[in-house]
Amino acid sequence: MQRTTVDGVTVLWAPGPAPLSAALTFGCGARDESFRTIGVTHLIEHLAMSTLPRLHHEHNASVDLEVTRFTASGRPEQITAFLAAICAALSDLPLDRIRHEAGILTAEASSVTSPAAAFLLNQRFGARGPGLAPYVGPGYDRLSADAVRAHAAAYFTRGNAVLQLTGPPPEGLRLPLPEGRPPQRTTPAARTGASWDEAPIEGAAIALATPVGSPAAALGLALLEHRLTELARHRRGLSYVVQAESSLRDEHTLDTLLSLDCRPGQEAETAELLWQEALRLGRELPTEAELKDEIEGFRESYEDPRAVEAELDRAAAAQLFGLPPRDAAARLAALRAVVPEDVRACLARATAGAQLAVAPDVEPRLAAPDGRPLPRGACWEHGVLPAGEVFRPPLSARARYGAARRSRLVLTGDGVAEIDGDGRLHHIRFDEIVGLERDGEDRTLFGASGCLMELSPRKYSGCGKVIRAVDAAVPAGLAYEASALAPQDPEKT
Ligand SMILES: [Zn+2]
Ligand SMILES: [Zn+2]
């Protein structure tokens, strides 16, 4: 792989099959947004693409959790023109088009991960960083031109960009991006300890954290995927697809999200199987033959001539996120040096802090590695209802609904707590509110640890006092009127 610099932008290239393919990659993804600015990266991508004239060669753009990519393939002069146009657009975004693109983006309703991965990341990080994945957020019509400008200035700069090419840089290549330094990223607080909860998914899924670039983790996770496929699909006919996604937490930790779908009625069994197989890899040594087989799979994929673009993606991520760059030969050598005990130890650490998501309305039998029942709950709060002024649902609702009889809202000195209709505790301190949605006299509160609370005088008698306290405590920048565009989702996610 070759490395050069054009207009201050790192260019990585390696010869690949024709035609020339380019990917201008920015170290900016959904994890770099805040709850209040959810979608701003995708909006910037659309604004930039909206400036292009009609093009007859392949081109596209995408946003995932970590990066935004502008891609094109074609003749060298077409690539040069495409990249020049994108760089010019990013230097001077057509902010007058925000309203128009907001409508398009709302209709597109894209998501950066699968629903299972989004749920698990939210369980792990709350409404921060990768944990923002499941939320619609305030809506594209609630993103201001200032927010777009600030985000572009922080992330869409030459210091936070890498150009990947499947051939030498074409003549006349220019990348006139705004100046900027690599952004300072902070690692979001992550939930510790294993837990499970029900999620709006069809089967079951698990989040496992492992060291970035760890060959033992790569083998352990590949082996887990393989064993699950064998057991679930071939032997028991439970499941059809094992899907793996990953999310880079920081330069040290990778969160891998593995999901298994299943036939209706097999949800509990599928969840138990997923959890038992993950635990088993943390307890029992894999055989040498199993590891050899997985290494063979990696070798095959590294040596595939079509792997050029994947290698460039990997090298770009290493450059953007400060990871050690390692080529296929070095990675293969590292895999071959792994012994079974490395894999066991790595999976034992990962399962000790795993989060599990299970299809709704099933009660799987899940025990923690120490044998105790696995704790349940999507919210981080597991304490008791704090003291304060108590509000209850209207008498008429309490007479008719058990859920209303169970519900309590408590205004504490520094926040709001609730026992919901399912008897679960939520607690949001004012200083950890990430979003306050106003819809007439109703409010929806979003807490950093993933809690969501709906405040309405119809739901709680005398709730107006709580709403006034919340309105007074939340900084103006975090409050917004409910979107006029966003499709109404009962979960607001
Ligand atoms: Zn789009
Ligand atoms: Zn909660």
Image (spheres, helix red, strand yellow):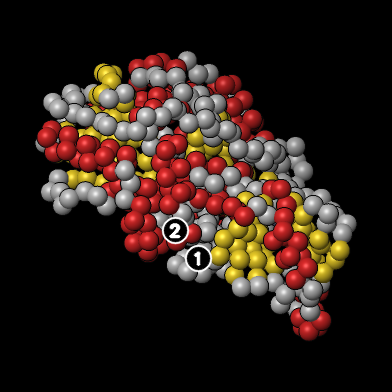
Residue 315 spot, x, y in % from top left:
36, 25
Q: Is residue 374 visible?
A: yes
Q: Are marks 1 and 2 in contact (CB under 8 Å)?
A: yes
Quadrant showing the C terminus = bottom right
Residue 95 spot, x, y in % from top left:
35, 52
Which residue type does callout 2 highlight?
Tyr
Q: Is residue 309 visible?
A: no
Residue 445 spot, x, y in % from top left:
66, 59
Above or below, comparing residue 439 to residue 321 in the picture: below
Viewer-closest of 339 and 86: 86
Which residue type does callout 1 highlight?
Ser
- Mark 2 lies on a secondary structure that is helix
Residue at image position (62%, 47%) is 126
Judge left or right: residue 169 versus residue 288. left
- Callout 1 crowding tier (Cα within 10 Å): few <14, some 14–19, many ≥20: some
Q: Which residue is mark 1?
A: 483
Residue at image position (86%, 63%) is 389
As drawn, the label of residue 60 is: none
Q: Disc count in the image? A: 2
Q: Which residue is mark 2?
A: 140
Quadrant showing the N terminus = top left
Q: Earlier in the sequence, mark 1 or mark 2?
A: 2
Above or below, comparing residue 441 to residue 175 in the picture: below
Judge left or right: residue 54 versus residue 333. left
